[in-house]
Amino acid sequence: MNFTIPKIFITLLLSCSIAVSIEPARADCGAVGVADARLGSVAAKAYARHFARGLAVAVVQNGRIRYAEGFGYADTGRKVSVTPQTPFAIGSLSKQFTAAIALQLVEQRRLALDDTIARWLPMLPNARTITVRELLNQTSGLHNYPYFSEHPWPTAGRIHIARLLKFMALDRPDFAPGSQWEYSNTNYTALAAIEADVTSRPYRRLLERRIFSPLKMSQSGLGYLAQRALHPATPFLADASGISPIPPAQRLSLDLYSGAGGIVSSADDLARWDIAVLGGRLLDPAMRRLWWSPGHLADGSKTSYGMGWVIADLDGRRELWHNGFSPGAGGFCYNALFPQEGLAVVVLSNTGSFAANGDAPLRRLVAALARAALPTAFTEHAAPAEDPRITRRVAALWAAYRAGKPPLAEMEPAFAALFTPAFTASLAKGIGALGAPNRWVFLGKRGLGGGLTLYRYRAELRDGSSPTFVVAIDAAGKIAGSRLLP
């Protein structure tokens, strides 16, 4: 997964984680196919593009489920249809839950954000200097997992977290704690282990007691036991030859992903979760603000990642989102919150791929559903003070990406260094699939400090979609970064 890294450059994205009674705000929130013609049309048209075999969607607004529906099949062999209650392996959406439990323990003073992890996980590298906060913010430097070329990771049946930690202890850190941001599943599996140690309860039991049971999330569970009990949607893999199911013998145990990505849940259950999150029922106001706030590096600079949430915006509206993909067990998934609008969008699929477009279809669907739910709030008009020279450069950059010939001489060196042959080819495939925009609409600019200026454009494409293309230019006139937003 790619996320933006602030300060130096912006990475280009082709899609660029309380034991009290918490009742959902809607008594019939489990109803299949909650009606909303506008949202239903958006979801149905997206599914018709055949990017996933099974798809479940839920939209929450103002404490109620406004729309929920399933499309396609959870099991094509037995012709079991997807409904809002269909369980899916949700991958890294799990990080929101792991972070919430950690912050609950902080509220209860059973854990402190600035505790070092050596107390619980002395076997991990830099354990004496890595803090709980750095695990949550993804700034610990712990190496990502699981790379099967590096260790013989266990993949079947019940897998105790101690077996995962044993391999993690062998990895060298990628950087000094707090010095950089880097997405790493290891951070959140380490957090799950700490939470279990602090409470003397298995992480699975913590989820059930603190979240699933109080919120009545009956189609949710963790790991291999949840796979056996809940029978999540059959995972599919999309590649050059088409979309095919992953055979049972090749499916991975979700115990492998633990607190980083091991949860099974449904669109209906995640809607209940989002209602509780937006309603402030899981954490006190100060802790929730921290949950949703950007992390900081040791030099004081901010990242664009909070604690299990990516901090972003859509059409100028604050957005908190995370994507998820558990290879070998599930497909691409999304959960996005728009706190000021009381809006949440859940999109779950059973199809995944490492192709250039990645989870872009789901990301576009999330944006389209948000805009359909709040058409006035998400309307963005052309901004004044457009510089035609910049517009021409932006259009030329898009064309260069499509052609597989990035203008390296026009780029800031750190940004140019990203364009390896493999990355350039992947980028050309992804941008090429979108085609040449019919029109560029200037949306505005702002200074980022350090001489950087961010220019935002809407690319009106032939298929009717209109993603936002953001380009950063430094004081010397070099392209310092770019990002594609849905």
Image (spheres, rainbow, N blue to C red):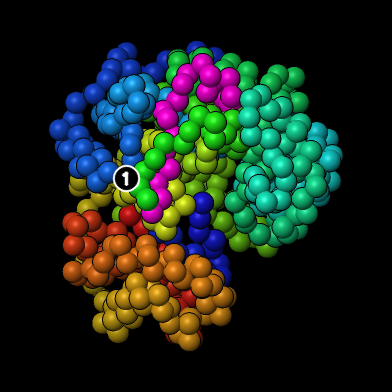
35 above or below 472? above
The x, y position of residue 150, in whole percent, is 71, 50
The residue drawn where x is 42% and y is 15% is 23
Quadrant containing the C terminus in the rendered view: bottom left
Residue extending furthest toward the left: 37
The residue drawn where x is 35% and y is 76% is 403
291 above or below 311? above
Residue sitting nearer the eye, 272 or 268: 268
Residue sitting nearer the eye, 263 or 105: 263
> In the image, what residue type sits under mark 1?
Phe
Residue span colored magenta: 222-240
The x, y position of residue 118, in whole percent, is 83, 40
Q: Quickly name the residue at label 1.
A: 51
The x, y position of residue 395, in whole percent, is 29, 76
362 above or below 416? above
The x, y position of residue 48, in whole percent, is 22, 42
